[in-house]
Image (cartoon, grey):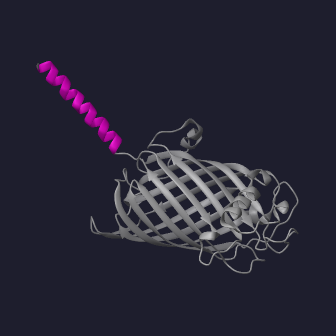
Amino acid sequence: MRRTTILSALLMAAVTTAWADVTNRQDFVFTANEENDFFSIPETDKHYTQGIHFSLLWPDDEVPWLARPLAWTPPLGFQGPIQKFGFELGQDLYTPINLTTSALVTNDRPYAGWVYLGALREDRGLTANQIPTLDRYEVELGVVGPWALGGEEQDWWHGLIGNSLANGWSHQLKNEPGVLLRLDRTWRVVDRGEADGVHVQLLPRAGVALGNIQTSARLGATVRVGYHIPDEFAATIPPKCGWYVFSDVGGRGVLYNEFLNGDVFHAGHSVDPEPGVLELRAGVVVELGHSEISYTYVYVNKEFKEQGLYDAYGSLTYRYRF
């Protein structure tokens, strides 16, 4: 009887420990994102006109074998970070303003499609001065040109919403391989509010992108105000119902952008990029237990010298934490 009691106690301890291990970490995270100038106010149909992206992050500290090379890089200044690894599949489309002509539009950006598969890594934890920090690494490998199926995707979407088809995809960038390396760091430097009330947060960030798709550096900051804002920096994100609104300002210095500078390995159409680009974002996020739904309005000032007006698009995101 005593032996049975001891075994039962050991079993309960093991189960409790295993449950603690499971509940004290983040599990799979799935994200679906659609960016489209159809979602902007007023609706437009030009330049960065659509992007669709799907990502899946594995449970904490589990490394799928295709993402193992990302695990070889040491954390940057963290004190025992928690890591997540995963993948992203995406497609982005770019067009000039004039979609009706079949001739080359020489004073506007070229048609371009970009489809890629990316390996992801996120490090979260504390850095110097005990500041909650989130790093995101991404290595994207893909193709630019007709193989990216940009024209086919836009024709399908325009048919769905009843818009006329674009006639200039024969002038798009040629088929070329693309490589893009990204590193972004976000800090939470302000978090004010009651334990179960409205919070105000300030999150500055910095990042770099390297590759033939884009080479740039970025700086920005986000202000969030809301109730039960999910804590992306913590070990766990308990499912709750909540909301927050946010405003964001960011800028990037651009050395190279294939979608403006044109093909790397082929001669073709290009425009003159602006060295600096300003982006303003504002949106709302609703938390419903394990699910998160958000809308973001994005304003982008001139990206190239021949450009007339600013660009704008809307972004819809659905995220599910298992």
Determine the residue located farthest toward the bottom in the rendered image: 308
Q: Is residue 183 magenta?
A: no
Q: Is residue 252 visible?
A: no
Q: Nearer the viewer, residue 185 or 119?
A: 119
Characterize the magenta stretch by its predominant secondary structure. helix
Q: Is residue 204 above or below residue 65?
A: below
* Number of disc labels: 0
**What quarter of the picture does the N terminus occupy?**
top left
Compared across the picture, whether 119 is left or right of 6 comes to: right
x, y percentage for residue 309?
A: 70, 80
Q: Is residue 5 magenta?
A: yes
Please tell me which residue is depicted at 83% across the width and 75% down the height of the picture.
107
Compared across the picture, whether 293 is left or right of 207 comes to: left
Please state the extent of the stretch shown in magenta in the rendering.
2-23
x, y percentage for residue 209?
A: 64, 58
Please tell me which residue is depicted at 49% across the width and 71% down the height of the picture.
283
Q: Is residue 99 visible?
A: yes
Q: Nearer the viewer, residue 236 or 91?
A: 91
Q: Is residue 142 above or below residue 219?
A: above
Compared across the picture, whether 218 is left or right of 148 comes to: left
x, y percentage for residue 297?
A: 55, 72
x, y percentage for residue 140?
A: 65, 50
Quarter of the rendering containing residue 242: bottom left
Q: Nearer the viewer, residue 158 or 169?
A: 158
Determine the residue located farthest toward the left in the rendered image: 1
